[in-house]
Amino acid sequence: MSVIISLLNHKGGVGKTTSAINIGAGLVQLDKRVLLVDLDPQANLTISLGIPRQKITIYENMRGEAEITPYTVKDGLDVVTSTLDLSGAEMELINEAGREYILRELFEPLMHDYDFIIIDCPPSLGLLTLNALTTSNYVYIPMQTEFLAMQGLAKIKQITDKVRFRLNKKLQIGGVIATMYDSRKVLNRDIVTTIQKFFGDKVFKTKIRENVALAEAPAARKDIFDYNRRSNGATDYLALAKEIVERVDSVTA
């Protein structure tokens, strides 16, 4: 059965899409089968991997017009693509019965095809994000190690708790990912210390360092391992992928 992970932060620019792509690619390096789901109408994940516009995207899937048809990026890594049309989905589905469970039903035929399904959520807490949380085992929170990035963490925890209570008993916050980290900066170190006080051992030991290759890779339409596997970005995301597998295995053992 697939482990389903939602990457969520309603603040933009924290490395959410970068983390979704490169955690997925890192897991592939560990011989895992991974499906990335671009649930953001901005379609940054789709664009960053250079995937051409598909006839069937997550928008058509959510509207019930077609089953999920993943696009294969490389061996072990498939993507469910997005489109700007998805921005209208929340209004279009508002009167649908069971609208919170649409994504869960779409995933059911795929649950034995992948080891991990990773959802790149939109930077909002609307119906699309609610669908992601309703189907997920874990929420991972990518967080830039800056003061303003901390605002709203309590809200994410509150939403997660409500979804677990009302819609998805298995949902839990699986981890916080410190991104754009520079150990030389006192502020960065202090922010990590603060979130460790709030989330405890849920904060991943691996920190994603500031790295120009991570910014360059989307322009080349590649993940960090295909772009520059010797970069700090590749080193960090591979270490994070290993840590994720260890955590998941420790729960399922």
Image (tube, rainbow, N blue to C red):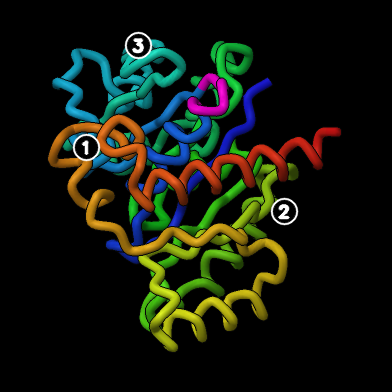
Magenta span includes 252:
no
- Per the rendered image, the range of residues in magenta is 28-33
Amino acid carrying mark 3 in the image: Ala
- Tell me the distance, in whole angstroms, between the alpha carbons under discs 3 and 1: 24 Å
Which residue is identified by label 2? 165
Between discs 3 and 1, the one toward the N terminus: 1
Between discs 2 and 1, the one toward the N terminus: 1
Q: Measured from the top left, where is residue 95 in percent x and y?
A: 40, 37
The nearer-to-camera label among 2 and 1 is 1
Asked whether 143 or 134 is in front, the reply is 143
Q: Please tell me whether mark 3 sits on a helix, a strand or a loop.
A: loop
Which residue is identified by label 1? 48
Which residue is identified by label 3? 66
Residue 128 visible in the shown view: no
Residue 211: mark in rendering: none
| Residue that protrudes farthest toward the right in the picture | 253
Q: Please tell me whether mark 1 sits on a helix, a strand or a loop.
A: helix
- Tell me the distance, in whole angstroms, between the alpha carbons under discs 2 and 3: 31 Å
Q: Is residue 112 left or right of residue 251?
A: left
Q: Measured from the top left, where is residue 131 in percent x and y?
A: 49, 40
Q: Measured from the top left, where is residue 198 in percent x and y?
A: 65, 77
